[in-house]
Image (cartoon, rainbow, N blue to C red):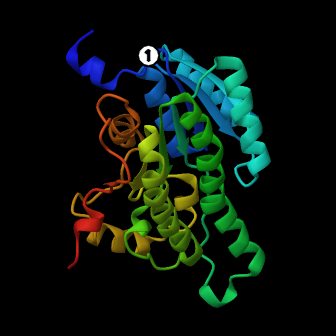
Amino acid sequence: MSYLEKLFSFQDQVAVVIGGTGVLCGEMAEGLGQAGAHVVVAGRSEERGNARVKSIEEKGGSASFASVDAMSKASIQELCDKVLAEHGRVDAVVNGAGVNSATPYFEIEEEEFDKIIRSNLNGVHYSCQVFGKAMIDAGRGAILNVGSVTSFLPLSKVYTYAASKAAVLNLTKNVAREFAPHKVRVNCLCPGFFPAEQNRKILSEDRIADIMRHTPMDRFGDAEELNGATLLLLSHTAGSFITGEAIYVDGGFTAMTI
């Protein structure tokens, strides 16, 4: 095994990707699979989950699907118990389930606000509690929470989403501090603008133009471009001294002012 392979190998490890049925986390699951991990693709849609599992296997990886409701701590606990019963370990977890909305501020109803907060923030919190406890008991682990460029500064039109992602980053730093003495690392990956399903719904021509004016690389990201940061932050070798950090994969969006 080469030096680079040793740094980024996930051979014989088990990685759980909550939200792996989606576009971005699905690609992150593929990256972990190709790095050698057995990937548990977790989400609500069995159809999309199994499609992702098939894709990982076709590329030489190992994967399985597990159903989970990220807004339910009981469901996440069931997922953790299932993974431990079947595989005996959990080395890495990605918390990436989430929803978005561009409802005008004064039109945001309580139900919509609560749903977005529960999905994007509560789900991360529940998973950190459940899987963090399992990792502490095992003496090692790595958790990667998916934030956003809105974790850095609020973004217009997506009020609740932006608030939830800012909270995800704050929670990540707090939990990282709590877990660090127990050899469990917690970091935050903050994507910029990618052609994910939830983003397409709110990308008008004017909004795309505004985004590009603020993105020095002048393009959207490709989902696979999240894999490098994912592997770094979850690797017990390459990322062994990284915790409580946020890495922005955004083409320079958060570095731009005028």
Q: Residue at x 57, y 53 (%)?
A: 197
Q: Residue at x 79, y 46 (%)?
A: 74
Mark 1 neighbour density, 10 Å: few (under 14) some (14–19) many (20 or more): some
Image position of 169 with respect to 50: above or below: below
In the displayed structure, does residue 223 sit left or right of residue 16?
A: left
Residue 190's quadrant in the figure? bottom left
**Residue 149 percent coordinates (x, y):** 39, 64
Q: Nearer the viewer, residue 155 or 234?
A: 234
Q: Nearer the viewer, residue 152 or 186?
A: 186
In the displayed structure, does residue 187 sit left or right of residue 125?
A: left
**Is the C terminus in the top left, top right, bottom left or bottom right quadrant?**
bottom left
**Is the N terminus in the top left, top right, bottom left or bottom right quadrant?**
top left
Image position of 182 with respect to 248: above or below: above
**Residue 170 percent coordinates (x, y):** 46, 65
Residue behind mark 1: 11
Residue 107's quadrant in the figure? bottom right
Q: Nearer the viewer, residue 221 or 117?
A: 117
**Residue 47 percent coordinates (x, y):** 73, 33
Q: Residue at x 38, y 58 (%)?
A: 192
**Residue 16 percent coordinates (x, y):** 58, 33
